[in-house]
Amino acid sequence: MKSHAEVVVIGGGVVGCSIIYHLTKLGLTDVVLIERSELTSGSTWHAAGGFHTLNADTNMAALQGYTIRLYRELEEITGQSCSLHHVGGITLAESPERWDFLKSARAMHRHMGLDTELISPAEIRKLSPITNTDGILGGLYDPLDGHLDPSGTTHAYAKAAQLQGAEIVLRNPVLETNPRADGSWEVVTEQGTIVAEKLVNAAGLWAREVAAMAGVYLPLHPMEHQYIATDAIAEVVERDQELPHVMDPAGESYLRQEGQGLVIGFYEQKCVPWAVDGTRWDFGHELLTENLERIEDSMAFAFKRYPVLAEASIKTIVNGPFTFAPDGNPLVGPLPGLPNYWSACAVMAGFSQAGGVGLTLAEWMVEGEPSRDVFAMDVARYGDYCTPAYTREKVSENYQRRFSVSYPNEELPVARPLDTTPVYPIWKSQNAVFGDSYGMEQVNYFAPAGELPYETPTFRRSNAFAIVAEEVRAVRQAVGLNEVHNFSKYEVSGPAAFDYLDRLMAGKIPPVGRLSLNPMLSKKGRIIGDFTVSRLSDERFQLTASYAAQAYHMRWFQQHLPKDGVSIQNVSRERIGFQIAGPNAQTLLSRVTRTDVSTAAMPFLSVCEMDIGQCRALVQRVSYSGDRGYEIYVPWHHQVALYQLLVDAGSDLGLRPFGMRAMMSLRLDKSFGSWMREYKPDYTPLETGLDRFIDYQKPTNFIGKAAVLAEKARGATRKLCTFEVEAKDADAVAWEPIWHAAEVVGYVTSGGYSHSAQKSIAFGFLPIDLVAEGRIVEIEILGEMIPAKLYTAALFDSKNEYLRG
Ligand SMILES: Cc1cc2nc3c(=O)[nH]c(=O)nc-3n(C[C@H](O)[C@H](O)[C@H](O)COP(=O)(O)OP(=O)(O)OC[C@H]3O[C@@H](n4cnc5c(N)ncnc54)[C@H](O)[C@@H]3O)c2cc1C
């Protein structure tokens, strides 16, 4: 083994092998993979080998499509067969809700170039005569689905990487990983020590243990999983064509042909987390004890769906463990706070995802950033609220929901409440319906007194519709109060703080007492943050952004932090409070402070420290609802006192608390985009309109400057637009295709119902030559073509006169 390498990958499962293949494909040859035993010695060897493209996140689905298309290329490069069976797959819909789910998945696939198709029960029977379609409404057919040989495929990745210069060291457990002063890693193995400039943890079943060697915790957990293979079945033997896969979500099962028999696997409700206290190092090529009792209900269901199974004899039962993150997506990317340490773990569907994971990681390492937004699998989408117990509970929930319908308004109940603010009990007593963001409870809306505080999950307008309308009305006509804990907050200070922020942010850094809206860009000029930068003094700033992006943003801040002169602290949990918004907000604020808060003294986009009652507060004149409003930040322990003050002072002003549902409705008629919907690394400032906040002239060479200047000179090829949609009971949510002249020309980024404008509104991208005031397009919502009209001026306060007044 070498003593030094540019990249060392720990783990020779399908993921580690895909990473070294992609690194070499992008031109990096000084790459070493170290495997404890033989290749495939973790989860990989006993996988059922199925692959599919379905994923709730579009970019994940696209990467799964990439993975599947890669296999032929691997076979060609290496001559090693992956034993590909492109038999296609059908996902069944047994309820109107699932049928809606499949329709929205189909719509989403249209602009991703995936040729899925909705098919009838008769078509399902034609493709898969062994499927009993009683009670089935239809199915989604994906011609890309299929299965392969897990071992052959892993070896194909490995061989392709070796052909391009990668080195693979087998039978060599990594024992320690130690950070070195120069930022590289010392990797101590049984066969000696190697220094890695960059280290990748792709240790699968042992990812937790390998992470612990570096003193970090990765939120993943292994689960037991069982599938059954049958002996030959007459109905299968008689066919001259291989059967397609069938996913039966109602029965929590997937089924495929294996030889002349069938394989059926289950995601059962009585699931079992495996190796709770850690994976034993001597766990080898072994299976776990089978447990048919755990899957007997699922099997009884399967006998009805596939009657041929009832008579079939069992050839083998496989019970093996594999790892999941709390949301079931992989944990990929540089670990926040640990320079040059990369994660490629929790890949639960290695044969659908490993190619995309390998490509992403390789692009990130070689080119500095992935070619698309990968937040859905970024290891930094989780924070320190993820303890092992939290992870275990969430992973079990995710396993049980593997085949559940995911609704756009759904809130998952397990491991909650976890983080709460001091006013949580007050909200609870007011019948609040909560959502969770990054472990923190936040109010979605307040259910009417006497009603169960529960929003029905649906693709259509929910039972919250009427009450959210009332909350919106209170804001627009009087004054509303909402917590600011859905913002992350960072305190940046020190003599070099200005220079640091001036380089990090693409916009103007404001003078003392003012705030500016500021895009943060990657080197390639993509949007990686939309911040409010508030200048509290010459050398002290507060930044606010999305609460859910804390680890993601802190990683970037730390990666660019100079050695001296700047300190940055994440104060998201410590600095909380409320926003008040609406025509009466100024009067309300003036009643609780002696500071002059008139527009002359405290104009729009100003920031000021003041006393509110007994609380020392930081107050910003800005509001995401688009109303005249203020954000009031106080220390954690003053939040209840501040609440009481505001409520007492606002009772005759029509003050009413409102939740995130109302907030997201309010932004619509202002055409305000939002983080991870309109503003994310897939998009650029010019495409989204954020270019108006960029200071192209500033002398500082801010990150992304060259890219956005080049884009400005070139012009954008697509543009984010606002549409008025003739929706009836289902609004656009995200990813719905936009049609024009019988072609898909764009897609929706987000949408909803604007209670204030009383219109259904959607934001979405169109090619630049189609952007025109009044342009009529069609948006495909749940399989229906809904006319929509493009408009350019915000429906509410388009000149911002009320906002600034
Ligand atoms: C029963 C079952 C059925 C499945 N069916 C499917 C399916 O149909 N389709 C699908 O896509 N996926 C399926 N999976 C999941 C699939 O197996 C995993 O997604 C995939 O194998 C994960 O690969 P990996 O490389 O991340 O991890 P692993 O396969 O666990 O590989 C990790 C490797 O790291 C090595 N390693 C660990 N620690 C060290 C160390 N300290 N030093 C050196 N080496 C180390 C291990 O020896 C191991 O080889 C199934 C899993 C099971 C259990």
Image (tube, grey):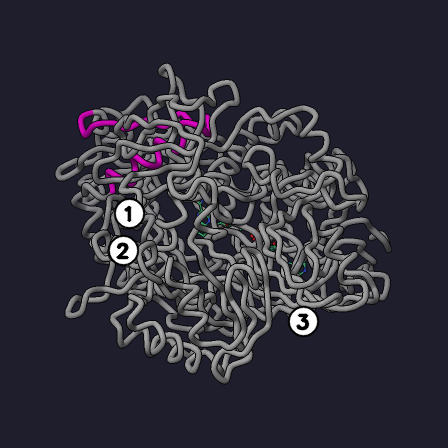
Q: Report, in whole angstroms, how far the alpha carbon at label 2 lies from the one at label 1.
A: 8 Å
Mark 3 vs 1, N-terminal side:
3
Q: Residue at x 25, y 27 (%)?
A: 119
Q: Which numbered dot is residue 215?
A: 3
Decide if ligand 1 comes within 8 Å of the CB at mark 1.
Answer: no
Q: Is residue 168 left or right of residue 221?
A: right
Residue 150 in view: yes
Residue 112 among those drawn in magenta = yes
Mark 3–mark 2 CB contact (< 8 Å): no
Instruction: Please state which amino acid type lies under the numbered disc 2.
Output: Val
- Quickly name the residue at label 2: 468
State the extent of the magenta-drawn residues as a range: 98-122
Q: Is residue 661 left or right of residue 593?
A: left
Name, please, the residue furthest toward the left: 134
Mark 2–mark 1 CB contact (< 8 Å): yes
Residue 661 spot, x, y in % from top left: 34, 55
Closer to the eye: label 3 or 2: 2
Instruction: Please state which amino acid type lies under the numbered disc 1.
Output: His
Q: Report, in whole angstroms, how far the alpha carbon at label 3 lies from the one at label 2.
A: 45 Å
- Quickly name the residue at label 1: 755
Instruction: Please state which amino acid type lies under the numbered disc 3.
Output: Gly
Q: Residue at x 37, y 33 (%)?
A: 736
Closer to the eye: label 3 or 1: 1
The answer to which quarter of the image holds residue 775 is top left
Mark 3 vs 2, N-terminal side:
3
Mark 1, residues whose alpha carbon is within 10 Å: few (<14), some, or many (≥20)? many
Q: Is residue 789 left or right of residue 79?
A: left
Residue 393 in view: no
Q: Residue at x 66, y 67 (%)?
A: 536
Name, please, the residue furthest toward the top: 741
Mark 3, residues whose alpha carbon is within 10 Å: few (<14), some, or many (≥20)? few
* Magenta-colored segment: predominant secondary structure: helix
